[in-house]
Amino acid sequence: MFHSRLRVRVGPSMDKLVCITDKVNSGKAHDISSELFEGKVAINIKGFTNPSGKEHYAEYFDREDRKGITWSIQVQGRFLQPTSADDVMFGNTFDKRLKLPWGAGVALKFMKYVDPTLEHDLLSQTKPWALSPLIATMPHFVHERIDDIRASPLLENRRSESSFPPSRSIGEDTSQLQFAIASSNSSSSTYLTPYSSNSTFVTPSPSLSIASSSSNLSSLPKMPGSLGVSSNNSLRLPLEKAHMKKNKKGRIFGRALDLRTTSERRSYFSSPQHRQEIVFGPEDLITTDFCYGYLQFKPTLALRISGGMTFDLMKYWDRHPVRFVCCKRKKPGDGERSDGQPTGDIYWIVSIETADERDIHQEDSTTGKGI
């Protein structure tokens, strides 16, 4: 039975998806690069069975802070063109109308409960979709400001020793997000940086970066960057000494956001106004882990929601790829994309698909054996 066997493809666009099935649960990342985004992606799926029928084990699911998780998409990268955090979206798109099961309304309410910022048109007769602002929907989010960091030989050495995905779970760190607050007194986006001439810095303990969202910032372990750039932990600005700057209208920029947990970040950025104040650009290294336990892939594809309800999605799936998309918000007047996707520009895609005999034959001819 091939319905329980999967393949995974990733890429910067629909026409550049490549199969990375052999990297699932391996602790290895795949590079993604385009004119819009540069980064790495690593996939873990509990009970993952490849097209040849072999189940891949992942140490990731044995971690104490990942108990109950059934899948994970870890991404680290940079948006190469300045973009408002309100316009960087993440979620799912589908190629044709969904055959929603009885009780789908309950599932949709559950989704909205999990993510109040969710926007969707899952009842579309052509291209259903469900998307949320990335900064508000990610359960684990780390932001690091990396401008001018390549000038430091010390950090250059630290950078060469780094790796992705990290051996410790990605957690929560938005302590440098204040530097991505854009000025509104210029026609183009302007950023405060840790290198502003009138900023005050001290050298804190290099211990901020990856940790569980409930941890205190003072105990967060570090996570160096791994994309030819590095974290600037030794140059980190303490929250209580954040540089403050006012424009002519008296608006404050560079203020400390003081968002110490996932729930605080998600609550704060549930506001479109707060999201619009943040601009991601090449100076911002963003690391995320989108991981949950409400989808299971073995023994069959199913949706589990609170209250003990389970939907066997194989009865309704109709072999749709489970496609996770990071994209730009589609604006009125954007027109239709050539690939038919109901989004703006695409940054990266992860597509989880059912495999068939053709996939097995392709793997056998490539490797000489099943993966």
Image (cartoon, rainbow, N blue to C red):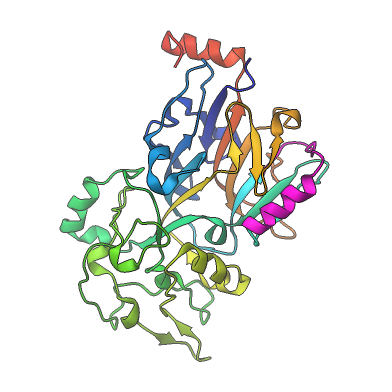
**Quadrant in the picture for the C terminus:** top left
Q: Nearer the viewer, residue 185 or 218?
A: 218
73 vs 308, left or right, is: left
**Quadrant in the picture for the N terminus:** top right
198 vs 299, left or right, is: left
Q: Which residues are magenta?
A: 93-114
Q: Which of the 4 image quarters holds residue 357?
A: top right
Q: How far across and how far down the image is residue 127, in percent?
A: 76, 42
Q: Is residue 305 above or below residue 195?
A: above
Q: How far across and how far down the image is residue 280, in percent?
A: 47, 62
Q: How far across and how far down the image is residue 166, in percent?
A: 33, 45
Q: Which of the 4 image quarters holds residue 56?
A: top left
Q: How many numbered tags mark residues here?
A: 0
Q: Look at the image and tell me whether residue 201 can be seen.
A: yes
Q: Residue at 49%, 62% (x, y): give it.
A: 82
Q: How far across and how far down the image is residue 267, in percent?
A: 56, 69
Q: Is residue 123 above or below residue 259?
A: above
Q: Residue at 45%, 61% (x, y): give it.
A: 281
Q: Residue at 51%, 82% (x, y): give it.
A: 185
Q: Is residue 212 above or below residue 163?
A: below
Q: Nearer the viewer, residue 12 or 55?
A: 55
Q: Residue at 21%, 45% (x, y): give it.
A: 161
